[in-house]
Every structure is written in C-alpha cells, then in structure tokens.
Amino acid sequence: MSEFLKILENEVQLVALAFMGTVYLLRLLWMFRFKAPQDFSYGVGSSKVGVAYSMMNVAMPWAMESVRRNWSFYLQFVIFHLGIVAAISATFLIPYWPQLFEIKMVVWIFQISLAAACFVGILRLIRRISKPALRLISSPDDYFSLVLMTAFFASGVFAVPNKHTASEWPLIVFFTMTAFFLIYVPFSKISHYLYYPFTRYFLGKQLGHRGVFPRKRGGEKPAGLE
Amino acid sequence: MNEKSISIEDVVSLPLDPKEQKKAVEEKVPCVAEGRLKVYDPNNNNVKKFLELLKSRLNRSVVGSMTGCIHCGMCSEACHYALARPDDPTMVPAYKGDQIRRIFKKHFDWTGSIFPWWVHAGSPKNDEDLNRLKNIVFGTCTGCRRCTLNCPMGVDTAVLVRLTRGLLTELGIVPEGVFVVSKDQWETGNQMGVTEEEYLETLEWMSEEISEEIGDPNFKIQVDKEDCDFIYTINPREVKYDPRSIGQAAKIFYYAGESWTMPRFGWDMTNFGLFSGDDKLGGYVAKNLYEAAKRLRAKRIVISECGHGYRSTRWEGYNWAKYAQNIPSESVLVTLIRYISQGRIKFDPSKNPLPVTFHDSCNLARSGDLTEEPRWLLKRVCTDFREMFPNRADNFCCTGGGGALSMVEYKPLRMEVAKIKAQQLIDTGAKQVCTTCHNCIDGLGDLIRHYKLDMKVVQVIELVANALVLPEKKEKK
C-alpha cells in the first residue's frame, strides 16, 4: 500500500472525523441554546411513551398513512439507509480490520448493499427531477447531497474488495469522498439525522402527553367510562 | 366533483385590506389603542420587525422543524390542498413550511447565511413579500396537522404556519376577517362579540324552553353559581346561531342530576389566538375561563363540542397563559359517557334511525385525545352508525379549520379543495354527518351546499338529547 493511501485511510479520515464531530457538537450546543417548550396542562397519556413511540416511528411503517399507501418508498428508505450503514462501516473496517474483506461472502454482502443503495439513489434522483412538487422544493443542496451519496455508494462497491495490490484507485476515490463527506455533511441536509431526535422528541412528548401517541386504531376504552 | 382549478397566483397576490384596521384606529377601539392588537403601518420597517419577532419566538421544538425537513415530499400525499390540486406544486406542505424556513435559514442558520442560494435561503424584501407570505399561511393551510403525522422526520409544518401567522398578526398583515374576530375577542372576551345582555337573555330563553319541555317550573340555567361540580363553557356560535345546543346540554344535565353553572364572563372556550398565532390573545382568552372556574370554585371545567375550542382550552391555553392547570377540564363528550355508564341518563337509539357517519375534527383527533369517545356515544344513541374512511387521526380536514371560515377571500380555493372531504362523505352513504366541532359544522355545511350533497350536519349532543328517554314523571307534561 502506498504511503498516500495509508495517510488517506488513517490520518486524513481522523482529522475529517474530528472536524465533523466538532461541528456537530457546536450544532448541538446551538440547538440547546433555544428554550424547550413547557407544558402546563394535565396529561391524559404518557410523554415518555409518546417519545418512545415517536422515535420508533422509523421502524413502524404501518404507523403513517403516507407509508402505508407507499410501501415501495419505505422499502427504498430501508435499502438506502442500509447502504449508508454499509458505507460508513466500510470506512472503518477497511483500514482497521482489513482481514474481514478477505472473506468473499462479506465482500458480496457489502457490494450488494451498496449497489442496491446506489440504485435507490438513482431512483430517488429521477423522482426528485420528474415530480414538479419535488422540483419546486428541492435546493441545490438536495440534489448535490443525493448525487454525492449515490456516487459514494458506487465508489464503495469497487472499494470493498480492498485489493490495493491490484489498483489503489477505487480506495483512493472512496476515501477521498469519505473525507469530503465528513467535512461537508454537517452543513448539508445529510445531517438530518442530527435533528431527527429533536423533532421526534418534541412531537412525541406533546402528543404522548395528550394521548394521541401511540396512535389509536379503534377499540380503545374511552375517557369517562368508569 | 370536477371543479375548475383556480389560479394560485390570484390567491397569493390578494392585497392587504386594512379597512377595518383603519376604522378601529379612528374609533379608538381600546385593544388597538393600547397596542394589544396591532394594525398595519407601512412606515414600521415591517421586514426588520418581522425578523426581530421571529428571533424572539424561536424555541427548540420550532428550530427542530425549521432544520429537520429533508424535502422528501411525503407530505404532498397527506395534505387535502395538495391532493385536490395535484398539478399545483405550491400546495405541498413542505413548500408552505419553506416560506418561513428560508427566512430562518438566511438569518439563523450557518449554511443559509453564507451560501443562501445553495439551500434556498432568502429574506422578505418588502411588505409586498410579507403580504404574499400572509396569503400562503392564512389562505393555503388550515393547520390540520395531517402532514405532521405523515412526516417521517416529525416536522410540524402546522406549527411553522401558526408561528408565521403570529408574526404577521404582530404587524397587522392579516386577512380582514382575522383582524375583526381578534378585535371582538379582545374587546368582549368572545370571538363573536356577544354582549353580556345577549348572552344572559339567551340563557334565560333556553331556561324557559327547557323548563316547559321537562315540566319543571323551577328549572333555570344557573349563572355564576359558586361551588358547582363544573362550569359549562361554550362556543359563542351557540349563543348567536345555535342556542338549541345549550338547551340540549341543559336538558341532559338536568336529567343527570348535575350541579353545574355557566360563568357570566369567561364562558367562551373558543380561542382565535390558535388561528391567528397570537399567543397573547390566546393566553388572555384562556385565562378568563380558568379564572372564572377559580372564582366560582368549580371542581371541573366542561367544554362543549368544539374542536379548536377544546384544543385551546384543554391543552394550548394553559401554555399560552403560562397557567399551571389546577382543576380537571374535559369535553362534554366525556361527561356524557360518564352519565351513561353510571346509568344517570337513559336513551333509545331508535329515535335516531337515519344513517350517520362521524367526522373527526383535526383539533380533537390530531392535536387532542378524543377519537373513541364520540364513536362510543354514537354507537349507543343511533341505530345506523357508519365509519368514514380514513378516520380518526387520518381523517381529512372539513376545510373550515384554521380560522378559514373568517377569511372569505380564500373561500373559492377552500371549496375547490373540499372535494376530498366531499368524496369521503359521499362514500359513507350516510344521510347525516356528525361532528363535535362548530367550525366543522360550518365547514361541512359549506361543502355540502357547494357539492349539493344529500346530507345534514349534526352534533353528538343533539343526537344524545334526541335519544333521551325521559323518566315517567317528567313525561307527563
């Protein structure tokens, strides 16, 4: 392995990761500067249950009508995010546990996950461009983030075999993109996972307190029934 | 059902009409003279003021919704405006939320303040832009929260819309109807400007009617009686247009042997602050009611059937007024369930033979806790209850929510998007649609007339009162 790739896989990644961590920390401090809303009313449900329900929403496709009516979109969401998990894992596993990628099955699992996510990325890009409503609300950041992710998945497909003896280029591309990602992500929509706990927490807290979450499906005991 | 789609440009370019505001200034209406209700002033540097107000209103929950939208577009399948106008991308809730989000990004977010074009950040340039914003947040969203519950990120677009409405209200950049109703509620304590004399006369009239009906000459709706089990709070629409509902409630309370009263002041459980986004008005109105209960040493507050009134009084009002709740407050539906389960009133469902469906008010189903209660009652007091689909928290808005009924300039758009609700009603095959909200009564009434549906709107209390089986001795009259 060349010295350049070695530095790219290690020092460069660590510096970029530290940068991302610092920006995220600042971002969280910024969020906490804003006051949390208070509730002065008696509750009928549990805020804690509401928060848990709200947070778990991502794993409950039946809980939202928009998903119930559009299962393929949820499937795409799962595939896309599994691809993200695979790509992020690969950025750590390749430099620090390279033996893992000597197992063919592992390489295939990673490659299939990344290729599927890449395919979903392309579908999402087509959807974003072809739907007028999505075109209207999409900013350059929305397009760029999606293109970047899709390209990242594609580069991952070629990088995970970790054959630097054959050619270092797939790894150089993959790790250069990773470093760029780590620096760019905190300023882009990709950092939405940082805000997810906030939006979900407050929605769950309020609606749990009011007994709206967990969602009622009928047959629950009405209030006032002794 | 094929309505001609109206041009959205005609809606968002509707000019500000400050006629009523000028009149209020000339007449030195106290709430305006004292600055509680703001009027439009073109020399106020409104954009700067708007940004200052926005800064002061941000909290962690709001900032979450400002930063959390990923523009996935899932909300487009939840909103009745977007569904009814599929070729109009400006109807998508994310777009409506983006109108305030872009300002937030430009002034409070890193990327947006440095590279605004990259994230569609921007700032209103003048009052014309603020007026356009007014038409979007007041005219193209009823704040029903259906998009909120269908957002994978949990972004609360309705909260952003209400926040923006509140900022514009502080600048007097509001639809005329919003100004008039706010003024009435500030001035008289109720949003229909009902005078104390009118209110007491109506209660007197209803007392006489019920007294005659039940054959008890001593029956009287008690006003300001202390130490009762509860105070009954109502919608001023009941005084103005539907006093029978007060009589129906009074009759049921009588047969249940209830100890109750109605306050002389602080009886309006509706709250226009919810719609205008004015927390000060919201807190003032809610506090009047809470203080009435305290003054009369009531053990509970009972709220008559009203979606936004229930949400405001039961949930939001305590927060707007920063008033720690000290006695329970409940919907009259819960009170009715208690009477039935305790055997305090008897009923005969055959008195309500017409097929009836139930429309969930957005404020009760998505922002409140009442979905099973009305169904429990309807299944007992009617012979043919038919569920509407989708229902409960997935139900569609009646299209009259969010104060839309007071904003006549947006009615053509409201009627166009009402086709979603109209289809829902038609599909039930019912002859009556029951709702627990006065806004919904008018919203549904409007669309029933517009789409010429063979259906009438009723309330739960009306059906319960109609099904009442009177005790022998009381039936002699």
Image (cartoon, rainbow, N blue to C red):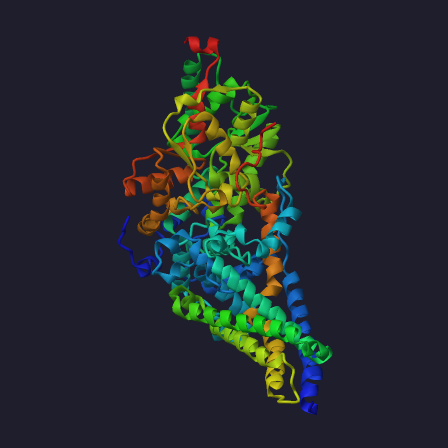
Which residue is at a point 50% across and 41% down the rendered structure image? B364
Instruction: Say left or right for B58 vs B162.
Output: right
Considering depth in this image, is A6 or B9 the residue closer to the camera? A6
Provide residue A159's location: percent of width, then percent of height: 61, 81
Say if B125 sits above or below B253 in the image.
Answer: below
Say if A169 sits above or below B90 in the image.
Answer: below
Q: Is residue A140 visible?
A: yes
Q: Residue A195 lies in what quarter of the image?
A: bottom right
Provide residue B355's location: percent of width, then percent of height: 37, 31
Instruction: Say left or right for B13 vs A19.
Output: left
Provide residue B116's location: percent of width, then percent of height: 50, 73
Which residue is at a point 62% across and 55% down the rendered structure image? A55
Image quadrant in which the C terminus of chain B is located = top left
Considering depth in this image, is B127 or B102 the residue closer to the camera? B102
Say if B155 sits above or below A44 in the image.
Answer: below
Q: Is residue B246 visible?
A: no
Considering depth in this image, is A195 or A175 the residue closer to the camera? A175
Say if B217 sits above or below A83 in the image.
Answer: above
